[in-house]
Amino acid sequence: MRTSLVSPRTVGVRSIAVLGAVMLLALSAGPAEAHATLVSSDPAAGQRLATAPALVVLRFTEPLNGRLSRVIVTDPSGQQFQGGAAGSEELQVRLLTNAPGSYRVVWATVSVVDGHTLHGGFAFGVGVPVGGAGPPGAHAEDGAGTGPRLADVLIAAGRAAEDAALLVAVGMLLLVGLARLDRRLPAMRPRVHVALAVALTAGLAVSLAEAVAASAVPGASVWGMAAYLTSGLAGWARLSRVALEAVALSLSLPLSARGRLRAWPVVALVVSLAVVALAASGHAAGATPAWWGVTADAVHLLAAGLWAGGIVVLATVRLQQGPLGWTGPQGRALLARFSPVALGAFVVSAGFGVVQALQQVGTVGALLGSSYGQVLGIKVLAVAGMVALSIRAWRRRPVLRTVAALGLTAVALAALLAAYPLPPARLARVEAQARQPSPDLALPRPGDLTMGGHVGPVLVGLTVRPGTPGRNDLLLYLLPAEGELAASTIRVAVAVDGHGVPVEQCGPACRRSTAALAPGALGGWSPAARGGGPAASRAVAGRPGAGRGRSAGTRARHVPASRPAIRSVVARRSG
Protein backbone atom coordinates (compact mmCIF):
# COMPACT_ATOMS: atom_id res chain seq x y z
CA MET A 1 0.00 0.00 0.00
CA ARG A 2 1.19 3.49 -0.83
CA THR A 3 0.54 6.75 0.95
CA SER A 4 0.55 10.30 -0.33
CA LEU A 5 0.01 13.74 1.11
CA VAL A 6 -2.86 16.05 0.23
CA SER A 7 -3.05 19.78 0.74
CA PRO A 8 -3.66 20.67 4.41
CA ARG A 9 -5.54 23.83 3.48
CA THR A 10 -8.91 22.30 4.33
CA VAL A 11 -7.53 21.31 7.73
CA GLY A 12 -6.50 24.85 8.62
CA VAL A 13 -9.63 26.62 7.38
CA ARG A 14 -11.72 25.21 10.22
CA SER A 15 -9.48 26.80 12.83
CA ILE A 16 -9.28 30.31 11.35
CA ALA A 17 -12.65 31.51 12.67
CA VAL A 18 -11.94 30.33 16.20
CA LEU A 19 -8.43 31.81 16.16
CA GLY A 20 -9.68 35.15 14.82
CA ALA A 21 -12.28 35.39 17.55
CA VAL A 22 -9.69 34.67 20.23
CA MET A 23 -7.30 37.30 18.83
CA LEU A 24 -10.13 39.84 18.96
CA LEU A 25 -10.74 38.79 22.56
CA ALA A 26 -7.08 39.37 23.42
CA LEU A 27 -7.00 42.77 21.74
CA SER A 28 -10.31 43.87 23.24
CA ALA A 29 -8.90 43.18 26.71
CA GLY A 30 -6.81 46.28 26.15
CA PRO A 31 -3.87 47.49 28.17
CA ALA A 32 -4.29 46.52 31.80
CA GLU A 33 -2.50 48.08 34.72
CA ALA A 34 0.53 49.69 33.14
CA HIS A 35 2.39 49.60 36.45
CA ALA A 36 2.69 45.84 35.97
CA THR A 37 6.47 45.64 36.28
CA LEU A 38 7.29 49.00 37.87
CA VAL A 39 7.50 48.36 41.60
CA SER A 40 8.35 51.85 42.84
CA SER A 41 9.76 55.17 41.79
CA ASP A 42 11.36 58.24 43.37
CA PRO A 43 9.45 60.48 43.08
CA ALA A 44 6.22 58.51 43.07
CA ALA A 45 3.51 58.89 40.44
CA GLY A 46 1.38 61.94 41.16
CA GLN A 47 3.67 63.23 43.93
CA ARG A 48 3.97 66.99 44.50
CA LEU A 49 7.46 68.24 45.39
CA ALA A 50 8.77 71.61 46.51
CA THR A 51 11.86 71.30 44.30
CA ALA A 52 12.72 69.07 41.37
CA PRO A 53 14.74 65.99 42.31
CA ALA A 54 18.29 65.70 41.09
CA LEU A 55 17.74 62.02 40.30
CA VAL A 56 14.62 60.15 39.15
CA VAL A 57 14.81 56.45 40.04
CA LEU A 58 12.54 53.64 38.76
CA ARG A 59 12.71 50.12 40.22
CA PHE A 60 11.47 46.99 38.47
CA THR A 61 10.93 43.38 39.49
CA GLU A 62 12.95 41.62 36.78
CA PRO A 63 16.48 42.07 35.44
CA LEU A 64 16.55 44.58 32.60
CA ASN A 65 18.56 44.61 29.41
CA GLY A 66 20.75 47.56 30.32
CA ARG A 67 21.80 48.14 26.73
CA LEU A 68 18.20 48.61 25.53
CA SER A 69 16.11 49.91 28.46
CA ARG A 70 15.60 53.69 28.66
CA VAL A 71 13.82 56.39 30.68
CA ILE A 72 13.09 59.97 29.57
CA VAL A 73 11.90 62.83 31.80
CA THR A 74 10.35 65.89 30.15
CA ASP A 75 10.26 69.09 32.20
CA PRO A 76 7.51 71.77 31.97
CA SER A 77 9.41 73.66 29.23
CA GLY A 78 9.69 70.55 27.05
CA GLN A 79 13.37 69.88 27.73
CA GLN A 80 14.13 66.16 27.87
CA PHE A 81 16.58 64.30 30.09
CA GLN A 82 17.44 60.72 29.17
CA GLY A 83 18.76 58.01 31.46
CA GLY A 84 19.37 54.29 31.47
CA ALA A 85 20.04 51.27 33.62
CA ALA A 86 21.77 51.67 36.99
CA GLY A 87 21.95 48.12 38.26
CA SER A 88 20.09 45.07 37.03
CA GLU A 89 16.57 46.19 38.06
CA GLU A 90 16.77 50.00 38.15
CA LEU A 91 16.58 52.92 35.73
CA GLN A 92 17.89 56.39 36.64
CA VAL A 93 17.90 59.79 34.97
CA ARG A 94 19.60 62.91 36.30
CA LEU A 95 17.76 66.25 36.10
CA LEU A 96 19.53 69.56 35.59
CA THR A 97 16.48 71.75 36.08
CA ASN A 98 14.30 73.02 38.89
CA ALA A 99 11.52 74.56 36.83
CA PRO A 100 8.11 74.49 38.53
CA GLY A 101 5.34 72.56 36.79
CA SER A 102 4.41 69.06 35.69
CA TYR A 103 7.15 66.55 34.83
CA ARG A 104 6.47 63.55 32.58
CA VAL A 105 8.38 60.28 33.00
CA VAL A 106 8.27 57.80 30.11
CA TRP A 107 10.08 54.47 30.35
CA ALA A 108 10.66 51.50 28.09
CA THR A 109 12.21 48.26 29.27
CA VAL A 110 13.40 45.04 27.66
CA SER A 111 13.41 42.06 30.00
CA VAL A 112 16.48 39.86 30.10
CA VAL A 113 14.27 37.03 31.39
CA ASP A 114 11.98 36.53 28.38
CA GLY A 115 12.83 39.40 26.02
CA HIS A 116 9.46 41.16 26.24
CA THR A 117 9.36 44.93 25.71
CA LEU A 118 7.18 47.07 27.99
CA HIS A 119 6.37 50.79 27.94
CA GLY A 120 4.82 53.02 30.58
CA GLY A 121 4.84 56.45 32.13
CA PHE A 122 3.66 58.70 34.93
CA ALA A 123 3.80 62.32 36.05
CA PHE A 124 4.88 64.24 39.15
CA GLY A 125 4.72 67.93 39.97
CA VAL A 126 7.11 70.57 41.28
CA GLY A 127 5.18 73.28 43.05
CA VAL A 128 1.95 72.22 41.32
CA PRO A 129 -0.41 69.27 41.81
CA VAL A 130 -0.81 66.60 39.13
CA GLY A 131 -4.04 64.66 38.73
CA GLY A 132 -4.55 60.98 39.39
CA ALA A 133 -1.93 60.33 42.03
CA GLY A 134 -1.56 56.61 42.35
CA PRO A 135 0.86 53.74 42.22
CA PRO A 136 4.08 53.97 40.29
CA GLY A 137 3.59 53.47 36.62
CA ALA A 138 0.11 54.94 36.52
CA HIS A 139 -0.78 57.27 33.62
CA ALA A 140 0.43 54.72 31.12
CA GLU A 141 1.57 55.61 27.68
CA ASP A 142 2.03 53.62 24.49
CA GLY A 143 -0.37 50.91 25.60
CA ALA A 144 1.82 49.44 28.28
CA GLY A 145 0.09 46.66 30.10
CA THR A 146 -0.44 42.98 30.59
CA GLY A 147 -2.30 42.34 27.33
CA PRO A 148 -0.68 41.99 23.92
CA ARG A 149 -0.66 44.92 21.53
CA LEU A 150 -1.38 44.65 17.80
CA ALA A 151 2.33 44.24 17.02
CA ASP A 152 2.51 41.41 19.57
CA VAL A 153 -0.43 39.64 17.93
CA LEU A 154 1.18 39.95 14.49
CA ILE A 155 4.38 38.44 15.85
CA ALA A 156 2.26 35.74 17.49
CA ALA A 157 0.89 34.81 14.05
CA GLY A 158 4.43 34.14 12.83
CA ARG A 159 5.21 32.27 16.03
CA ALA A 160 2.10 30.11 15.49
CA ALA A 161 3.38 29.15 12.03
CA GLU A 162 6.77 28.26 13.47
CA ASP A 163 5.32 26.28 16.37
CA ALA A 164 2.93 24.37 14.12
CA ALA A 165 5.67 23.56 11.62
CA LEU A 166 8.00 22.27 14.33
CA LEU A 167 5.29 20.13 15.93
CA VAL A 168 4.26 18.75 12.54
CA ALA A 169 7.91 17.93 11.85
CA VAL A 170 8.01 16.01 15.17
CA GLY A 171 4.87 14.11 14.11
CA MET A 172 6.37 13.32 10.69
CA LEU A 173 9.54 11.98 12.25
CA LEU A 174 7.47 9.84 14.62
CA LEU A 175 5.55 8.23 11.74
CA VAL A 176 8.78 7.61 9.84
CA GLY A 177 10.17 5.92 12.92
CA LEU A 178 7.05 3.76 13.38
CA ALA A 179 7.22 2.68 9.74
CA ARG A 180 10.87 1.69 10.20
CA LEU A 181 9.97 -0.46 13.21
CA ASP A 182 7.07 -2.28 11.52
CA ARG A 183 7.53 -3.21 7.87
CA ARG A 184 3.85 -4.14 7.59
CA LEU A 185 2.92 -0.47 7.81
CA PRO A 186 2.65 1.64 4.67
CA ALA A 187 5.86 3.38 3.65
CA MET A 188 5.82 6.91 5.10
CA ARG A 189 7.70 9.54 3.18
CA PRO A 190 6.35 12.83 4.57
CA ARG A 191 7.91 16.05 3.37
CA VAL A 192 9.82 16.85 6.55
CA HIS A 193 11.94 19.40 4.68
CA VAL A 194 8.82 21.41 3.81
CA ALA A 195 7.77 21.63 7.46
CA LEU A 196 11.31 22.58 8.50
CA ALA A 197 11.53 25.21 5.77
CA VAL A 198 8.32 26.79 7.08
CA ALA A 199 9.66 26.65 10.65
CA LEU A 200 12.95 28.27 9.64
CA THR A 201 11.28 31.04 7.62
CA ALA A 202 8.75 31.83 10.35
CA GLY A 203 11.36 31.55 13.14
CA LEU A 204 13.72 33.92 11.35
CA ALA A 205 10.91 36.42 10.77
CA VAL A 206 9.75 36.25 14.41
CA SER A 207 13.26 36.64 15.85
CA LEU A 208 14.03 39.60 13.60
CA ALA A 209 10.68 41.26 14.37
CA GLU A 210 11.23 40.88 18.12
CA ALA A 211 14.78 42.20 17.81
CA VAL A 212 13.63 45.22 15.79
CA ALA A 213 10.87 45.99 18.32
CA ALA A 214 13.32 45.77 21.23
CA SER A 215 16.05 47.81 19.54
CA ALA A 216 13.52 50.53 18.73
CA VAL A 217 13.48 51.45 22.45
CA PRO A 218 16.76 53.39 22.22
CA GLY A 219 16.49 53.72 18.41
CA ALA A 220 16.37 50.87 15.91
CA SER A 221 19.83 49.73 14.87
CA VAL A 222 21.78 46.63 13.99
CA TRP A 223 23.72 47.11 17.24
CA GLY A 224 20.48 47.11 19.21
CA MET A 225 19.25 43.96 17.48
CA ALA A 226 22.54 42.22 18.25
CA ALA A 227 22.31 43.34 21.88
CA TYR A 228 18.81 41.87 22.12
CA LEU A 229 19.77 38.51 20.61
CA THR A 230 22.89 38.10 22.76
CA SER A 231 21.43 39.01 26.17
CA GLY A 232 20.20 36.46 28.64
CA LEU A 233 18.90 32.95 28.16
CA ALA A 234 15.95 34.06 26.02
CA GLY A 235 18.14 36.01 23.57
CA TRP A 236 20.60 33.19 22.98
CA ALA A 237 17.70 30.72 22.75
CA ARG A 238 16.24 32.73 19.86
CA LEU A 239 19.55 32.61 18.00
CA SER A 240 20.13 28.91 18.64
CA ARG A 241 16.56 28.02 17.69
CA VAL A 242 16.92 29.49 14.21
CA ALA A 243 20.37 27.91 13.82
CA LEU A 244 19.05 24.47 14.81
CA GLU A 245 16.14 24.79 12.38
CA ALA A 246 18.60 25.59 9.60
CA VAL A 247 20.76 22.57 10.50
CA ALA A 248 17.72 20.27 10.60
CA LEU A 249 16.58 21.53 7.20
CA SER A 250 20.00 20.94 5.65
CA LEU A 251 20.13 17.40 7.09
CA SER A 252 16.67 16.57 5.73
CA LEU A 253 17.70 17.33 2.13
CA PRO A 254 20.06 14.47 1.10
CA LEU A 255 20.08 13.47 -2.54
CA SER A 256 18.86 9.89 -2.14
CA ALA A 257 16.00 8.22 -0.29
CA ARG A 258 18.53 6.01 1.56
CA GLY A 259 20.39 9.12 2.68
CA ARG A 260 17.15 10.58 4.05
CA LEU A 261 16.51 7.34 5.91
CA ARG A 262 19.96 7.36 7.47
CA ALA A 263 19.69 11.03 8.47
CA TRP A 264 16.39 10.49 10.29
CA PRO A 265 17.82 9.98 13.83
CA VAL A 266 20.08 13.03 13.57
CA VAL A 267 17.24 15.17 12.20
CA ALA A 268 15.01 14.01 15.06
CA LEU A 269 17.65 15.00 17.62
CA VAL A 270 18.23 18.44 16.08
CA VAL A 271 14.48 19.13 15.84
CA SER A 272 14.09 18.14 19.51
CA LEU A 273 16.84 20.61 20.48
CA ALA A 274 15.07 23.31 18.45
CA VAL A 275 11.89 22.65 20.44
CA VAL A 276 13.88 23.02 23.69
CA ALA A 277 15.25 26.35 22.43
CA LEU A 278 11.70 27.38 21.56
CA ALA A 279 10.68 26.75 25.17
CA ALA A 280 13.68 28.68 26.54
CA SER A 281 12.82 31.79 24.49
CA GLY A 282 9.35 32.30 26.00
CA HIS A 283 7.53 32.73 29.32
CA ALA A 284 8.98 29.48 30.64
CA ALA A 285 12.30 31.25 31.23
CA GLY A 286 10.53 33.55 33.69
CA ALA A 287 9.41 30.72 35.94
CA THR A 288 11.05 30.08 39.31
CA PRO A 289 13.34 28.21 38.96
CA ALA A 290 13.95 28.88 35.28
CA TRP A 291 15.38 25.43 34.50
CA TRP A 292 12.20 23.78 35.70
CA GLY A 293 9.99 26.11 33.68
CA VAL A 294 11.99 25.48 30.51
CA THR A 295 12.04 21.72 31.11
CA ALA A 296 8.28 21.56 31.67
CA ASP A 297 7.56 23.60 28.55
CA ALA A 298 9.99 21.61 26.40
CA VAL A 299 8.53 18.25 27.48
CA HIS A 300 5.02 19.63 26.94
CA LEU A 301 5.88 20.77 23.40
CA LEU A 302 7.68 17.55 22.42
CA ALA A 303 4.80 15.43 23.70
CA ALA A 304 2.33 17.67 21.86
CA GLY A 305 4.35 17.17 18.68
CA LEU A 306 4.15 13.39 19.04
CA TRP A 307 0.41 13.51 19.66
CA ALA A 308 -1.12 16.52 17.94
CA GLY A 309 1.62 16.81 15.31
CA GLY A 310 1.18 13.14 14.43
CA ILE A 311 -2.58 13.59 14.07
CA VAL A 312 -2.09 16.57 11.74
CA VAL A 313 0.22 14.47 9.58
CA LEU A 314 -2.21 11.56 9.52
CA ALA A 315 -4.97 13.97 8.52
CA THR A 316 -3.01 14.93 5.40
CA VAL A 317 -2.24 11.32 4.40
CA ARG A 318 -4.40 9.65 1.76
CA LEU A 319 -4.24 5.87 1.82
CA GLN A 320 -4.25 4.44 -1.73
CA GLN A 321 -6.27 1.30 -1.06
CA GLY A 322 -9.67 1.84 -2.60
CA PRO A 323 -12.81 2.77 -0.74
CA LEU A 324 -11.75 1.28 2.62
CA GLY A 325 -9.25 4.03 3.49
CA TRP A 326 -8.64 4.27 7.24
CA THR A 327 -11.19 1.51 7.96
CA GLY A 328 -9.16 -1.00 5.94
CA PRO A 329 -6.62 -3.39 7.49
CA GLN A 330 -3.57 -1.29 6.72
CA GLY A 331 -5.21 1.93 7.84
CA ARG A 332 -6.29 0.28 11.07
CA ALA A 333 -2.78 -1.13 11.54
CA LEU A 334 -1.26 2.34 11.23
CA LEU A 335 -3.77 3.81 13.70
CA ALA A 336 -3.19 0.88 16.09
CA ARG A 337 0.56 1.46 15.99
CA PHE A 338 0.20 5.22 16.47
CA SER A 339 -2.49 5.20 19.18
CA PRO A 340 -0.41 3.93 22.15
CA VAL A 341 2.30 6.48 21.43
CA ALA A 342 -0.30 9.22 21.05
CA LEU A 343 -2.02 8.22 24.29
CA GLY A 344 1.21 8.28 26.29
CA ALA A 345 2.26 11.56 24.70
CA PHE A 346 -1.14 13.09 25.48
CA VAL A 347 -0.89 12.11 29.16
CA VAL A 348 2.60 13.64 29.39
CA SER A 349 1.56 16.76 27.46
CA ALA A 350 -1.57 17.26 29.57
CA GLY A 351 0.34 16.72 32.82
CA PHE A 352 3.04 19.23 32.02
CA GLY A 353 0.37 21.55 30.63
CA VAL A 354 -1.22 21.60 34.07
CA VAL A 355 2.18 22.36 35.59
CA GLN A 356 2.59 25.28 33.17
CA ALA A 357 -0.92 26.57 33.91
CA LEU A 358 -0.11 26.63 37.62
CA GLN A 359 3.16 28.44 36.89
CA GLN A 360 1.64 31.06 34.58
CA VAL A 361 -1.93 31.52 35.90
CA GLY A 362 -1.73 30.55 39.55
CA THR A 363 -5.39 30.70 40.62
CA VAL A 364 -8.84 29.83 39.28
CA GLY A 365 -9.80 33.48 39.65
CA ALA A 366 -6.97 34.53 37.34
CA LEU A 367 -8.02 31.82 34.87
CA LEU A 368 -11.55 33.19 34.66
CA GLY A 369 -10.89 36.88 35.21
CA SER A 370 -7.99 37.62 32.84
CA SER A 371 -7.82 37.60 29.05
CA TYR A 372 -4.76 35.34 29.36
CA GLY A 373 -6.82 32.84 31.35
CA GLN A 374 -9.71 33.05 28.88
CA VAL A 375 -7.42 32.30 25.93
CA LEU A 376 -5.94 29.41 27.89
CA GLY A 377 -9.47 28.15 28.61
CA ILE A 378 -10.34 28.13 24.91
CA LYS A 379 -7.13 26.21 24.24
CA VAL A 380 -8.18 23.64 26.84
CA LEU A 381 -11.56 23.28 25.11
CA ALA A 382 -9.81 22.68 21.77
CA VAL A 383 -7.66 19.96 23.35
CA ALA A 384 -10.75 18.43 24.97
CA GLY A 385 -12.40 18.30 21.54
CA MET A 386 -9.35 16.51 20.17
CA VAL A 387 -9.60 13.94 22.96
CA ALA A 388 -13.28 13.26 22.29
CA LEU A 389 -12.70 12.81 18.54
CA SER A 390 -9.65 10.64 19.18
CA ILE A 391 -11.81 8.30 21.28
CA ARG A 392 -14.22 8.15 18.35
CA ALA A 393 -11.32 7.23 16.06
CA TRP A 394 -10.50 4.28 18.34
CA ARG A 395 -14.07 3.12 17.76
CA ARG A 396 -13.33 2.86 14.03
CA ARG A 397 -14.88 6.21 13.09
CA PRO A 398 -11.81 8.42 12.49
CA VAL A 399 -12.34 12.14 11.76
CA LEU A 400 -8.70 13.07 11.57
CA ARG A 401 -9.06 16.34 9.71
CA THR A 402 -11.37 17.78 12.34
CA VAL A 403 -8.98 16.64 15.05
CA ALA A 404 -6.08 18.19 13.15
CA ALA A 405 -7.97 21.49 12.80
CA LEU A 406 -8.48 21.57 16.58
CA GLY A 407 -4.80 20.76 17.05
CA LEU A 408 -3.71 23.66 14.86
CA THR A 409 -6.10 25.92 16.76
CA ALA A 410 -4.51 24.86 20.08
CA VAL A 411 -1.02 25.56 18.69
CA ALA A 412 -2.09 29.00 17.49
CA LEU A 413 -3.61 29.79 20.89
CA ALA A 414 -0.38 28.75 22.60
CA ALA A 415 1.52 31.17 20.36
CA LEU A 416 -0.92 33.92 21.26
CA LEU A 417 -0.37 33.25 24.97
CA ALA A 418 3.36 33.71 24.39
CA ALA A 419 2.61 37.25 23.15
CA TYR A 420 1.41 38.37 26.58
CA PRO A 421 4.11 40.42 28.34
CA LEU A 422 3.05 39.20 31.78
CA PRO A 423 1.07 36.05 32.64
CA PRO A 424 -1.29 36.46 35.62
CA ALA A 425 0.95 34.63 38.12
CA ARG A 426 3.91 36.90 37.44
CA LEU A 427 1.62 39.92 37.48
CA ALA A 428 0.32 38.88 40.91
CA ARG A 429 3.89 38.62 42.23
CA VAL A 430 4.66 42.07 40.87
CA GLU A 431 1.56 43.61 42.46
CA ALA A 432 2.33 41.96 45.80
CA GLN A 433 5.84 43.36 45.70
CA ALA A 434 4.53 46.81 44.74
CA ARG A 435 2.24 46.81 47.79
CA GLN A 436 5.14 46.27 50.15
CA PRO A 437 6.30 49.44 51.91
CA SER A 438 9.19 51.12 50.16
CA PRO A 439 12.41 51.64 52.12
CA ASP A 440 12.90 55.11 53.58
CA LEU A 441 14.05 57.46 50.82
CA ALA A 442 16.81 58.88 53.03
CA LEU A 443 18.40 55.53 53.88
CA PRO A 444 21.66 55.01 51.98
CA ARG A 445 21.78 52.70 48.99
CA PRO A 446 24.72 51.08 47.22
CA GLY A 447 26.80 53.72 45.48
CA ASP A 448 25.48 56.66 47.51
CA LEU A 449 27.76 59.14 49.27
CA THR A 450 26.70 58.95 52.92
CA MET A 451 27.88 60.80 56.02
CA GLY A 452 26.78 60.58 59.64
CA GLY A 453 26.78 62.58 62.86
CA HIS A 454 24.54 63.31 65.81
CA VAL A 455 22.99 66.18 67.67
CA GLY A 456 22.68 64.97 71.24
CA PRO A 457 20.34 61.97 71.24
CA VAL A 458 19.35 62.52 67.58
CA LEU A 459 21.38 60.59 65.04
CA VAL A 460 21.66 62.46 61.73
CA GLY A 461 22.64 60.86 58.42
CA LEU A 462 23.26 62.78 55.20
CA THR A 463 23.00 61.04 51.84
CA VAL A 464 24.17 62.92 48.76
CA ARG A 465 22.67 61.31 45.67
CA PRO A 466 24.11 60.60 43.12
CA GLY A 467 27.19 61.92 44.91
CA THR A 468 28.95 63.44 41.90
CA PRO A 469 29.66 67.09 41.00
CA GLY A 470 26.58 68.92 39.79
CA ARG A 471 22.99 68.85 40.96
CA ASN A 472 22.43 66.42 43.85
CA ASP A 473 19.64 65.38 46.18
CA LEU A 474 20.46 66.01 49.85
CA LEU A 475 18.60 63.49 52.01
CA LEU A 476 18.67 63.75 55.79
CA TYR A 477 17.74 60.78 57.98
CA LEU A 478 16.83 61.59 61.58
CA LEU A 479 16.67 59.01 64.33
CA PRO A 480 15.89 60.35 67.82
CA ALA A 481 15.94 58.13 70.91
CA GLU A 482 12.15 57.86 70.78
CA GLY A 483 12.20 56.30 67.30
CA GLU A 484 11.50 57.35 63.70
CA LEU A 485 7.93 58.54 64.29
CA ALA A 486 9.14 61.09 66.84
CA ALA A 487 11.40 62.61 64.16
CA SER A 488 8.38 64.07 62.36
CA THR A 489 8.29 67.01 64.83
CA ILE A 490 11.95 67.98 64.41
CA ARG A 491 12.50 71.18 62.42
CA VAL A 492 15.40 71.01 59.96
CA ALA A 493 17.25 73.71 58.02
CA VAL A 494 19.89 73.02 55.37
CA ALA A 495 22.56 75.51 54.33
CA VAL A 496 25.06 75.16 51.50
CA ASP A 497 28.04 77.51 51.68
CA GLY A 498 26.15 79.58 54.23
CA HIS A 499 23.05 79.92 52.05
CA GLY A 500 19.82 78.24 53.07
CA VAL A 501 18.11 75.91 50.63
CA PRO A 502 14.46 74.76 50.70
CA VAL A 503 13.73 71.62 52.69
CA GLU A 504 10.68 69.36 52.43
CA GLN A 505 9.59 66.40 54.49
CA CYS A 506 9.71 63.06 52.61
CA GLY A 507 8.74 60.85 55.54
CA PRO A 508 8.62 60.91 59.34
CA ALA A 509 12.41 60.59 59.55
CA CYS A 510 13.26 61.95 56.09
CA ARG A 511 14.04 65.47 54.89
CA ARG A 512 14.92 66.30 51.32
CA SER A 513 16.66 69.19 49.58
CA THR A 514 18.67 69.74 46.41
CA ALA A 515 21.87 71.65 45.69
CA ALA A 516 24.48 71.99 42.96
CA LEU A 517 27.86 70.94 44.37
CA ALA A 518 31.32 71.58 42.98
CA PRO A 519 34.16 69.03 42.80
CA GLY A 520 35.71 68.63 46.24
CA ALA A 521 32.70 70.22 47.90
CA LEU A 522 31.93 67.19 50.05
CA GLY A 523 34.97 67.34 52.30
CA GLY A 524 32.96 67.90 55.49
CA TRP A 525 29.62 68.80 56.96
CA SER A 526 28.30 69.85 60.36
CA PRO A 527 25.01 68.87 61.96
CA ALA A 528 24.20 71.31 64.76
CA ALA A 529 21.35 72.40 67.01
CA ARG A 530 20.10 75.97 66.99
CA GLY A 531 20.46 77.91 70.24
CA GLY A 532 21.56 76.85 73.74
CA GLY A 533 24.97 75.95 75.13
CA PRO A 534 27.39 73.65 73.37
CA ALA A 535 28.23 70.08 74.23
CA ALA A 536 31.13 68.80 72.14
CA SER A 537 30.94 65.55 70.17
CA ARG A 538 32.50 64.03 67.06
CA ALA A 539 31.12 62.59 63.82
CA VAL A 540 32.62 60.94 60.77
CA ALA A 541 31.96 61.66 57.11
CA GLY A 542 33.12 59.61 54.11
CA ARG A 543 32.10 57.51 51.10
CA PRO A 544 31.18 53.92 52.03
CA GLY A 545 33.93 51.50 51.08
CA ALA A 546 36.45 54.31 50.45
CA GLY A 547 38.98 52.81 52.86
CA ARG A 548 40.02 53.53 56.41
CA GLY A 549 41.22 56.94 57.40
CA ARG A 550 39.62 58.64 54.39
CA SER A 551 36.93 60.50 56.30
CA ALA A 552 36.44 64.14 57.08
CA GLY A 553 36.19 65.28 60.72
CA THR A 554 33.04 67.14 61.65
CA ARG A 555 31.69 68.98 64.67
CA ALA A 556 28.29 68.65 66.24
CA ARG A 557 26.87 70.84 68.97
CA HIS A 558 24.01 69.68 71.16
CA VAL A 559 21.71 71.72 73.35
CA PRO A 560 19.42 69.94 75.82
CA ALA A 561 16.19 71.41 74.51
CA SER A 562 12.69 69.93 74.48
CA ARG A 563 12.89 69.43 70.70
CA PRO A 564 15.88 70.95 68.91
CA ALA A 565 15.81 72.30 65.39
CA ILE A 566 18.70 70.79 63.43
CA ARG A 567 20.82 72.91 61.13
CA SER A 568 22.87 70.90 58.61
CA VAL A 569 25.67 72.69 56.76
CA VAL A 570 26.88 71.03 53.55
CA ALA A 571 30.08 72.12 51.77
CA ARG A 572 29.75 74.89 49.18
CA ARG A 573 27.91 75.65 45.97
CA SER A 574 29.27 74.81 42.55
CA GLY A 575 30.74 77.40 40.24
Image: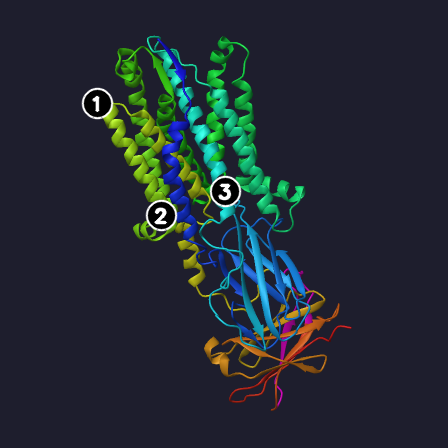
Q: Amino acid at mark 2?
A: Gly
Q: Residues within 10 Å of mark 1 (few under 14, many from 20)?
A: few
Q: Which mark is residue 373?
A: 2
Q: Amino acid at mark 1?
A: Arg
CA separation in Å, label 2 and label 3: 20 Å
Precedes in sequence: disc 3 or disc 1: 3
Q: Which residue is mark 3?
A: 154
Q: Which residue is mark 1?
A: 395
Query: Which quarter of the rendered picture does the N terminus lie within?
Result: top left
Query: Which quarter of the rendered picture does the C terminus lie within?
Result: bottom right
CA separation in Å, label 1 and label 2: 33 Å
Q: Percent position (x, y) of residue 279?
A: 46, 36
- How has the structure been colored for display? rainbow
The label nearer to you, 2 versus 3, is 3
Classify mark 2: helix, strand or loop: helix
The residue closer to the viewer here, 478 or 408, is 408
The residue closer to the viewer here, 446 or 88, is 88
**The quarter of the displayed image where residue 529 is located:** bottom right
Q: Residues within 10 Å of mark 2 (few under 14, many from 20)?
A: many
The residue closer to the viewer here, 555 or 58, is 58
**The quarter of the displayed image where residue 223 is located:** top right
Residue at the image point whose x is 49% and y is 54% from the top = 61
Q: Amino acid at mark 3?
A: Leu
* Magenta extent: 533-552
